[in-house]
Image (cartoon, rainbow, N blue to C red):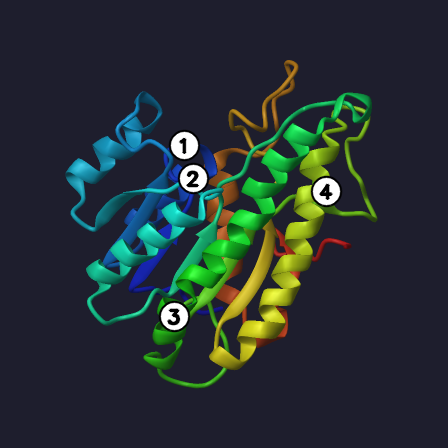
Amino acid sequence: MGELCVHSVLVTGANRGIGLGFVQHFLRMPKPPQWIFATCRDPKGQRAQELQNLASKHANIIIIPLETSDPTSIKAAAAKVGEHLRGSGLNLLINNAGILKPNTLDNETLEDMREVYTTNTIGPLLMGQAFLPLLKKAAQGSPGSGLSCSKAAIVNISSIGGSVASCTIWELMQAASYRCSKAALNMLSKCQSLAYKEHGILCVALHPGWVQTDMGSFDGHTPPVTVDGSVQGMLKVLSSLSEKETGAFLDWEGNAIPW
């Protein structure tokens, strides 16, 4: 297994939970990325305080405001990242930002379904489109053939909740809008893998596990996986991926999840 070694990475939803965990783990690498673009809705808000503190100590962290449901915000973020990279490409795009509405099926609404789908599915679609030129540039500037996350990759943080075959923990949480959005994200990941393979870009959907985050903890349930354990596992998986796995749906331990 090779070591994940990237010049630049962008993480959405980086102010807390899994997104913040990714930023922390990238900083701990033997060779940290030269650029860690950490995006969130409100960089100056209270919920981004920990990220702000990290950025004040590490010059390679660039905090960028980003609303993944807003095409204008996405384009502005892509332009800012391009300015910082100064002609080099973006190696790794991690679409982590996501929302969940814990509704029962009977209580799902048009508004909630639209909001969840826009953030969890359409956001990663638009992010892939906006950052494609920078990802292509990274792929072109990397030595060797084949695909890898050290070269150029889109990583969509999905969920086993989007697996039609398993439909796990239905009894605990129905959340149909979330499940539908993640099932659609899995298909998007497959489509991206087919469309972007010719550009040298690997695309994969990852289930991070049931993780101890604000989103993962509900109704008094404590998830079994820590943020640290999840992110560490996912980075290990990403370091091992090649063209054989592009378009796959895997968990944080590298196991294939049924569609």
Q: Earlier in the sequence, mark 4 or mark 2?
A: 2
Amino acid type, residue under disc 1 in the picture: Arg
- Are dots 1 and 2 in contact, CB under 8 Å? yes
Residue 141 place in picture, x, y as percent: 32, 79
Let me know if residue 69 appears in the view: yes
Residue 205 place in picture, x, y as percent: 60, 55
Q: CA distance from mark 3 to mark 2?
A: 22 Å
Amino acid type, residue under disc 4 in the picture: Cys
- Are dots 4 and 3 in contact, CB under 8 Å? no
Residue shown at the point (83%, 49%) measured from the top left = 165
Q: Earlier in the sequence, mark 3 or mark 1?
A: 1
Say which quadrant the C terminus sits in: bottom right
Residue 56 place in picture, x, y as percent: 16, 36
Let me know if residue 28 appears in the view: no
In terms of secondary structure, where does tag 3 sit?
A: helix
Amino acid type, residue under disc 3 in the picture: Pro
Amino acid type, residue under disc 2 in the picture: Gly
Q: CA distance from mark 4 to mark 2?
A: 20 Å
Residue carrying label 1: 16
Q: Is residue 142 left or right of residue 2?
A: left
Can you tell which mark lies on residue 180? 4
In terms of secondary structure, where does tag 2 sit?
A: loop
Residue shown at the point (72%, 42%) measured from the top left = 180
Q: CA distance from mark 1 to mark 2?
A: 7 Å
Residue shown at the point (42%, 60%) measured from the top left = 130
Residue carrying label 3: 133
